[in-house]
Image: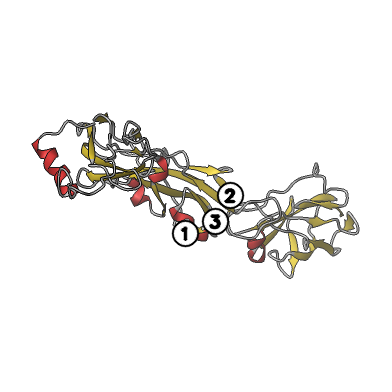
C-alpha cells in the first residue's frame, strides 16, 4: 500500500475524480471495498516482478474482482501488466525509472478508491548489447550447385539459436542473416579467423534470412561463403557474429573400359572407351572435358585426344613396350585422379587408365 504524498494524492484524484463519493442521506449505501496494492518495490530491469493485491477486502466479505492499471512508466518503456485482472499480476520492467501502478477492486456494486504501488528501477544499469552466435546444421560444409548423387547435401541451415540477450528474453531478439561476398566487407566480421569469401550469392530459402534458423542453397561456385548474423534487442542494440560455410567440389571420375585385347601389334588400332566417365556433381557433368595421354611413348589419337572415347595407334617402338593410356576428366573446378591398378574397378574396367602391351 502506498503512503500518499501530495503528488501521489493528486494522481489518485486524477484517476478517480475525487477522494470520496457521497450519496443521498436516504440512500441505501453498498459497502465500499478497499484496494490494497501492496508495498512499493525495488525492481531490476529485465527481471519479472509479481504484484500482490490479495490484502484488498470488502467489509461484507464478498469476492472481489481486480483491475490493475499501469499509470506511468519511463519514456520509451514497453513494459505491460500480465494477468491484470487477477490478485497477483506480473510486470517485467524494461527501463530504469519509476513505474506507478494503480489497483481498483469491485464487489459487484461499487469500485474501491484506487491504491497505488510504485516500482523503482535503477537507471544506472544500462542496456547491454546482445550476443550473436552463428553456427551451422548439420555442419558448415556442403556441395556446390543444386544437383548431385544421393546423400550429398547442397543445402545447409544457419543456426542462430544460441544467441542471447543479457537484459531481455532471447525471444524478443530479431534476427537478420546477410551474406558477405567481398573481402572488403570482412571488417564486418572482426572475430572470424579467416574471411576470404567467394563472390557468388547463395539463396535463402523460404524467406529464412530473418529467422533463427536460415536455410540456404549453395551457389554454382566453390570456396568459402561468409554469413553475418545480426541480432537486435527491443531497444535497438545489436550484436554480430559470422560463420564460414564451405561449398566443395567432387572431382569427376574418369573410367576407361578394358579394351577387347590388352596385347596388340605396333600400328594396330586400339579402341579406348571412356563413355562411362561421370561426375558426382551431376550439375557439372554436361561441362566435363577430357584428355588422353600415353606413356612412356607417344600415341596418335583419333579423332583427337580430347574426346571421351577414342582410338589410338602406337608406332616407332624400338622394342615391345607396355603403354599406359590415361584418361583425365576435368570439370570447371578440378580434375579426376586416376585410380591405378589397385582400384576395385580394375579387372572389368579401370578407373582412369589401362595398360596395353604393344608388340614391336
* Point 77% across, 65% down: residue: 309
- Of helix, strand and loop, which one carries label 2? strand
- The structure residue drawn at horizontal position 85% and vertical position 55%, both measured from the top left corner, is 258
Do labels 1 and 3 touch, CB within 8 Å?
no
Residue 184, image x, y percentages: 34, 51
Residue 201 disc label:
1
Of the 4 image quadrants, the one containing the C terminus is bottom right
C-alpha distance separating marks 1 and 2: 14 Å
| Color encoding of the figure | secondary structure
Q: Name which residue lies at 74% across and 70% down.
A: 303
Is mark 2 in CB contact (under 8 Å) with mark 3? yes
Residue 32 appears at what percent x and percent y? 26, 41
- Where is mark 3, residue-wise? 218
Residue that protrudes farthest toward the front in the picture: 26
Residue matched to label 2: 142
Question: Which image quarter is the N terminus in?
Answer: top left
Amino acid at each position: 500500500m502506498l503512503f500518499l504524498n501530495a503528488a501521489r494524492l493528486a494522481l489518485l484524484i486524477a484517476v478517480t475524480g475525487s477522494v470520496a463519493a457521497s450519496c443521498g442521506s436516504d440512500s441505501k449505501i453498498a459497502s465500499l471495498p478497499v484496494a490494497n496494492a501492496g508495498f512499493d518495490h525495488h525492481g531490476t530491469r529485465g527481471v519479472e516482478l509479481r504484484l500482490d493485491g490479495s490484502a484488498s477486502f470488502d467489509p461484507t466479505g464478498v469476492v472481489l474482482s481486480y483491475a490493475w492499471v499501469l499509470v506511468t512508466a519511463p519514456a520509451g518503456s514497453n513494459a505491460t501488466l500480465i494477468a491484470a485482472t487477477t490478485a497477483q499480476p506480473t510486470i517485467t520492467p524494461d527501463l530504469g525509472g519509476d513505474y506507478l501502478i494503480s489497483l481498483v477492486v469491485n464487489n459487484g456494486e461499487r469500485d474501491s478508491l484506487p491504491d497505488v504501488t510504485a516500482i523503482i528501477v535503477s537507471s544506472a544499469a544500462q542496456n547491454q548489447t546482445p550476443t550473436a552466435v552463428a553456427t551451422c546444421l548439420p555442419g558448415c560444409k556442403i556441395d556446390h550447385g543444386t544437383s548431385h548423387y544421393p546423400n550429398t547435401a547442397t543445402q545447409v541451415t544457419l543456426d542462430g539459436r544460441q544467441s542471447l540477450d543479457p537484459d531481455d528474453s532471447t525471444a524478443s531478439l530479431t534476427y537478420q542473416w546477410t551474406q558477405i561476398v567481398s573481402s572488403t566487407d570482412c571488417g564486418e566480421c572482426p572475430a572470424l579467423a579467416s574471411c576470404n569469401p567467394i563472390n557468388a550469392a547463395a539463396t535463402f530459402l523460404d524467406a529464412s534470412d530473418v529467422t533463427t534458423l536460415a536455410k540456404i542453397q549453395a551457389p554454382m561456385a566453390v570456396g568459402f561463403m561468409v554469413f553475418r548474423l545480426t541480432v537486435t534487442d527491443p531497444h535497438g542494440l545489436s550484436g554480430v557474429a559470422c560463420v564460414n560455410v564451405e561449398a566443395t567440389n567432387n572431382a569427376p571420375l574418369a573410367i576407361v573400359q578394358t579394351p577387347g585385347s590388352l596385347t596388340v601389334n605396333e600400328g594396330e588400332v586400339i579402341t579406348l572407351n571412356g563413355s562411362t566417365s561421370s561426375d558426382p556433381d551431376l550439375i557439372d557433368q554436361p561441362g566435363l572435358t577430357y584428355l588422353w595421354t600415353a606413356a612412356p611413348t607417344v600415341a596418335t589419337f583419333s579423332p583427337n585426344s580430347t574426346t571421351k572415347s577414342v582410338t589410338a595407334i602406337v608406332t616407332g617402338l624400338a622394342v615391345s613396350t607396355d603403354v599406359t593410356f590415361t584418361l583425365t576428366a576435368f570439370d570447371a573446378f578440378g580434375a579426376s585422379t586416376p585410380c591405378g591398378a589397385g582400384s576395385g574397378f580394375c579387372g572389368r574396367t579401370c578407373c582412369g587408365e589401362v595398360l596395353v602391351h604393344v608388340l614391336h
